[in-house]
Amino acid sequence: QVNVVESGGGLVQAGGSLRLSCAASGRTSSTYSMGWFRQAPGKEREFVAAINRSGGSTYYADSVKGRSTISRVNDRNTVYLQMNRLKLEDTAVYYCAVGSASVNPAQYPYWGQGTQVTVSS
């Protein structure tokens, strides 16, 4: 079992920045890839970014590419998502997931509870 806990969400003005953190603990969590997804009200959960287990490969959704950076610190089993130039449409609950580096949420067996990000005008 792998436990996943997100933090760092909050209210930010459009154009601002936010850094989300995700701490994974438990069974060999450092051997997994990790990803971020988000879900806005009335919409399906969508892929945001992912990073492989070594941290050498990263993947981004087109909607956040160039504005966001995913990184990880393996000895802390922690992943970060730095988001810059935030837009109103970035408002969502952000979920951290542990599994395979994929855009498909079904490839991640372990999920956190989510952290709310609200971007205001």
Image: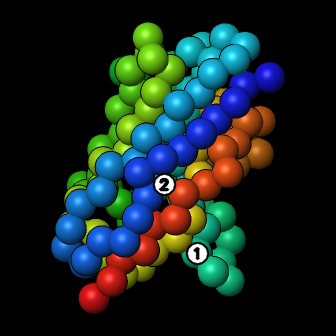
Q: Is residue 108 left or right of residue 65?
A: right
Q: Is residue 33 left or right of residue 88?
A: right
Position in image of residue 45 (x %, y %): 65, 64
User: Is 36 situated above or below 98?
Assistant: below
Residue at 58 percent across and 75 percent down: it is 40
Residue at 44 percent across and 11 percent down: it is 75
Q: Which residue is mark 1?
A: 40
Position in image of residue 101 (x %, y %): 57, 33
Q: CA distance from mark 2 to mark 1?
A: 12 Å
Residue at 69 percent across and 17 percent down: it is 26
Mark whose residue sits in front, 2 or 1: 1
User: Is 114 situated above or below 59?
Assistant: below
Residue 55 figure quarter: top left
Q: Is residue 9 visible?
A: yes
| Mark toward the start of the polypeptide (2 vs 1) | 1
Image quadrant occupied by the C terminus: bottom left
Kindly check if marks 2 and 1 are in contact, taking CB atoms under 8 A apart as contact: no
Q: How many marks?
A: 2
- Kind of residue at disc 1: Ala
User: Is 85 situated above or below 99?
Assistant: below
Image quadrant occupied by the N terminus: top right
Q: Which residue is mark 2?
A: 48
Around disc 1, counting alpha carbons within 10 Å, would you say few (fewer than 14), some (14 to 19), or many (20 or more)? some
- Kind of residue at disc 2: Val
Position in image of residue 109 (x %, y %): 77, 36
Residue at 25 percent across and 77 percent down: it is 13
Residue 3 figure quarter: top right
SS category of the residue bearing label 2: strand
Position in image of residue 60 (x %, y %): 41, 49
